[in-house]
Amino acid sequence: MHATKLKTDVLIIGGGFAGLWAARQAARHVKDVLIVDKGPRDWGGLGGMSGGDMITLHADQDINEWMDEIVFFNDGLCDQLMMLDTLRDSLPRFHDYEAMGHTFTRDEKGDYVRIPQRGLTHVSLTTSAPTGKGGINMRAALLRSMEGCSVRRMGNIMITAITKDGNRVSGAVGFFNRSGEPVFIEAKAVLITAGTGGWKASYLQNSMASGCVELALDAGARLRNFEFIDNWNVPKLFAWEGQTVLLPLGGRFINNQNEEFMAKRYSPVLGSKTDTQYNIRGMVLEVRAGRGPIVFDTSRIPEECMKEVTPAAGWMKLNNDKLKELGVDFFKDKIEWMPQPIASEGGIATDLEGATGVEGLFAAGTAQSLPTGVYFGGLSICHCATSGYKTGEAIGRYAAGCNAPSFDQDQAEELLNRELSHLGRAGIAPKDIVRVTQELMAPVDVCVLKTDRGLRRSLARLEEVKHEFLPALGAEDPHYLCKMVEARGMLKLTEAYLRSSLERTESRAGHFRADHPCRDEATPLYWVEICQNGQNMVIERKELPMSDYPVKPYRYYMDQFTFPLDEIESFLR
Amino acid sequence: MISSIDEEKCTGCGSCVKTCALDVFRLDTRNEKIAPCMAACPARNDLREIHYLLQQSRLDEALDCLKLTMPFPALAGRLCRRPCERPCSRHALDESVNIGGIETFLGDRDLARALSPVPRRHIFKAAVIGAGIAGLSAAWYLTKSGFPVTVFEAGEKAGGHLRSDSVCASIIDIYAAQLQAMGAELRLECRFPLTGPSWREELEDLDFRAIVIAAGSELKGKTPCGLELSDSGRIKVDPHTFQSSVRTVFAVGDAALDNASDVLSMVSGRRAAQAVGNILQGANADMGMHVRLHTVASRDVSGMEQRSPHPAGSDGSLTLEGTLEESLRCLTCGSRAYIAYPEDCMTCFACETHCPAGAIDVDPFKEFHPRHLDRRFIGGRK
């Protein structure tokens, strides 16, 4: 087959919001920026399917108050310098979005509509208008704003490996995922903005599987925060976006006794107005106690807010209309909700400008790690814009100031042939690996009230799957070859999760160990980091530079909850 | 999850294929009804299929498909007046697809291909007289079909009147070299006096069983021995097969056609090659060659999103990414979408919200996922 060879100054892997922001900025410094995405050329990543709501620190708000609250919310485990940068840059990026023609919601007085998050006082997101089309409009605005920039965008390319010139990055290899034709890309610098992905749960918005974990580890980068995942509450049978807006307005979870169990048993202060991780712990305990199923009750949302939360456009409206046709009324019926692991919150460790430890390799957006398992609605939209912008500037300057590395074609072909050699081979369907991986994650003692036993049970099964089924994976056509690489990446991601979760022998933020239900106050705060040694993951702790951080943790969000230890201990038996 | 596509409503515009991030859809491009661009193309290039292949980045296959009807796309892309672009459905929406730009890109990729010898499939030989693009076209298709072919050219180089253009001349040189690499013989500075009495016998004595005359307009008004002339003084041929009044002799390009465009010259070479193949295998020249009357697919563009063309270079050329992007503007008129990989659907509704024809139905009930609270996952099993 004819190989496609491309050459660029800055290669960006992932055409989502972070990648688009980065490309805009990098193009100010270099002649050519190339974005490749495994999805369609213009789909714009997961942000395009979001509500477009954005964490924004407005001019009348105090960054110190926000930081104090965020460190509290994260139980001390917060990359404060990166968070400070994100908050500082949020308003300029917010205004950039407006300048591109994007609309944020305003009330009758003309003020932005801000919705406080997770029962906090200060931290709030600003919503996009109209409800249901925010993400689509943001994507359109971003793409429009790039017209005339020296940015090339190509879709349906699956990148499978980063190439190196010594210790320096020299480009990447991959294939067109609808033809299987090889693609070789020479680049002075490479930016990964493809997220660390997840478990293809629920619906597309929250979770595309990604090969980013494998790419980064193989390239020599360090990963961080893989014990933290987005555990997400969703209706059991269909998709619904917007609980981060519904909960603060009065939405709540109730059990089969019609009790708002969070308020009654676990957190009289916050009730359901908290992070999903805590609601999910409550749900698990309720169902174990025989008080399931759990339903989402919207009857207490004030009438005047209903217009705001009823989908008015986009897929959310279509979804709502169809459900109504089928006799399901989201706001009137008792809809059963069930949590599931959606996406990893781990990412590639970088400095504040997105540089990894590997020369020429950068990461931004959800390929970085900012939240620690607890999450504000609208943080990703914000962080993708701020980190995309900042990293784009940095990688642009880097690439403008260096010579092209040498691209070793033999090395590149060898890396790619590992994948292409599977093409045309019958074998285990990638979707089955996806299903197995979802099952590895699903047990409650693996991802809600984690125990050493649960984590090791899944890890043992994962090793079996790796040995029994990975070598037997089939890829009858290029479509399946792409899905095969994804499925392998999901297994790697799951391994990173299990090993990191075992390493953190305490409970904090989004990580709860039933066998270590308290914070480890004796050990200084640390990140769990991962690097690769041969084919093995190496797990290491890295102390947080607390002396550089403005906020010294003194109060903890998790202390607002009283989960009964005797019921939690039942998970250990 | 994805439920169905209403075939009655689907216009084959490919919005679903172009927007699904999980790659669930494909198009069926086989249809009796051809696209409006194809109806206008003198070569009948399967533009719908070519663009669809490019939409999937199947670059090699797109080129192969083009080469079925167009032997020298690097020339055609530059020389053709692009009648295909006028009826393009996109014209009613924003701007026609840059079909010529795409062809030029594929053509330049074609020039870079290293060709290997075509295995010989036939015993009887064919001669082509004249190495202009009509003759080279005939030689290309005959060689591709496994016939031994010799091209006799009076000049020092192949190319005929196109040699006066330096870009075309260098392209012709590459194509001539490719033709030789495939196994054809090219004899330069070798003139057959076609008006002489014995040229046919000479060729027959050399064991050539069929002859394609592609000697340009130099014959005009002169009578090659034994062949009938048309009213305008060129060799009289059948309009489908380019067969002359003598069964084994064919004439293409300016030797047979009045005001032949370069593209028509190439088409005549292709058709003659097919007819030569027929007679060399004992059939009538026109076997399978009568032009079917195609109906043309409708051009409904209501509800479709506008999309401006990819900017072409100053010479009208497109880059690789420009070609792939431009191909996405093609509405693949007359094709039909189908659900190729249903198991990868994640119920995001992108296909349904983007379908301008309202043909797609997504069931709001999603795939059944393993979840924490299901009985088998909540138990804390040993």
Image: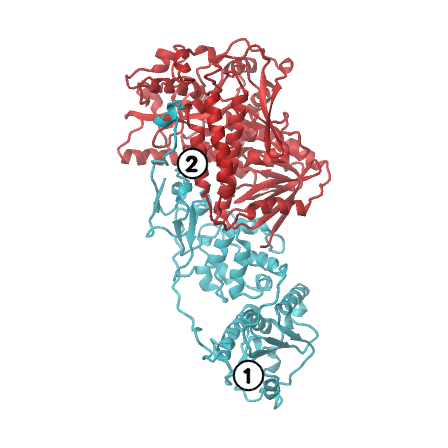
Left or right side of B325 for A390: right
User: Which label was assigned to residue B233?
Assistant: 1
Residue type at tag 1: Gly
**Which chain does the red colour mark?**
A
Q: Please identify which colour was used for chain B in the image.
A: cyan
Above or below A399: residue B240: below
Judge by depth and name the residue closer to the eye, A362 or B291. A362
Q: Circle 2 — which element? A: helix
Other-residue count near label 2 (Cα within 10 Å), few / some / many at <14 / 14–19 / ≥20: some
Chain name for mark 1: B
Residue A204 visible in the current orientation: no
* Rendered image quadrant of residue B3: top left
Residue type at tag 2: Arg
Locate residue B180, reporting x and y percent.
Answer: 64, 69
Residue hosting label 2: A435
CA gap, disc 1 and disc 2: 74 Å
Q: Circle 1 — which element? A: loop
